[in-house]
Amino acid sequence: MAECSRCGRSGEALYKLTNLPGLICKDCFITYYEKKVKNCVIKYEMLRGVKNIGVAVSGGKDSMALARVLSRLFPDIHLKLIHINLGIPSYSNECQKIVEKFADENSIDLIIYNIRELEGYSIDSFSKLPYVKRMCGVCGIVKRYLMNKIAYENRLDALATGHNLDDTVETLFKSYLKGDIEEIVRIRPLLPSTHPKLVKKIKPLIEMTERENLLYVTLTNTMHVDVKCPFFKDSRMMKRKKLISMLEEEIKNFKYIFFKSHLKKIQPVLSKVIVEPALRECKVCGMPTIKDVCSYCKITSKMVTVVER
């Protein structure tokens, strides 16, 4: 009978991880996962000076794993979950229900921001604009802007997101292909605040894979949305992730090696020669931007123009 490679117990469900030798049982996996996340947070000093932290939760496996593990590892830090209801028919309301249930069961403060009610549009509204070809890009602009704005207005010390190792490597892969040096420099576990209205961003799950996050929420009985956003299918991101997974099959721990090589060797060199552009305040909304008008105001103003027509 197979045994757990860590505790030696047999007769229980065992799981195989590509980056660990042998099989591992439920209890040992949870211990391994939480220790790895805690070490990552400590190593990159993510919680230095942080007493109140916003946790971006979509309802998916990664963000729910983030909410669960932070609540278990750092009980002395005040968590405030932030959920943006994107107004996608049926999908968004299901996501909100899961987040609300988790917050209620674990007595964690929750902010629900419904963009249809508060902003007058929904994400699927952008699909009607003739110039929008990549809905994921539009959604990213909206979520990044609103998450920072909500965190700033609630005087939170940091905003934690559920970006995982797969997400990070895919973004790096894309940035290297495009030669986007400015983006490459910014890909790191912690982004400090460089403007009074820009909240510090941290990524506690940046060394955890999608599979590890899925296994963690499953074994800790954490509810999560198990379907993809309807706009996510056939995205370029998915195609790049498939290619990276093929590399992982040929080169063991490719994702982790690629990320560590970037973080330890490439990013420090580039950061010395690439000067990040100075931030100013958007002439429309007053939030931080590198241009006169921020990306959020530009894209939402086009939405208003279409609606008025």
Image (spheres, grey):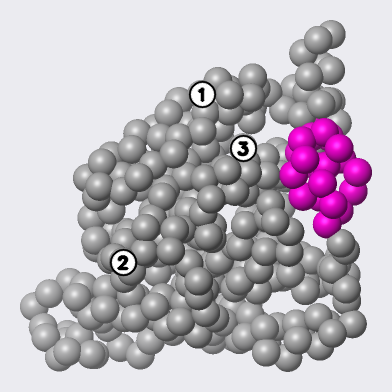
| Mark 2 lies on residue | 76
**Regarding mark 2 in the picture, which secondary structure is present there?**
loop
**Towards the viewer: 20 or 100:** 100
The image shows residue 19 at horizontal and vertical percentages of: 44, 84
The image shows residue 237 at horizontal and vertical percentages of: 67, 55
The mark found on residue 231 in the picture is 3
User: Does residue 85 appear left or right of residue 212 in this picture?
Assistant: right
Circles 1, 3 touching at the beta carbon (< 8 Å):
no
User: In which quadrant of the rendered image does the N terminus lie?
Assistant: bottom left
Q: At 17% across and 72% down in the image, what residue appears? A: 13
Which numbered disc, 2 or 1, marks the residue that appears first in the sequence?
Answer: 2
Mark 2 vs mark 3: give the one in front. Answer: 2
The mark found on residue 58 in the picture is none
Q: Amino acid at mark 2?
A: Asp
Image quarter of residue 239: bottom right
**Regarding mark 1 in the picture, which secondary structure is present there?**
loop
What segment carries the magenta color?
Answer: 279-299
| Mark 1 lies on residue | 89
Q: At 81% across and 80% down in the image, what residue appears? A: 271
**Regarding mark 3 in the picture, which secondary structure is present there?**
loop
Q: Is residue 297 magenta?
A: yes
Is the residue marked by circle 3 packed among few (<14), some (14-19), or many (20+) residues within 10 Å?
A: some
Is the residue marked by circle 1 packed among few (<14), some (14-19), or many (20+) residues within 10 Å?
A: few
Q: At 59% across and 48% down in the image, what residue appears? A: 152
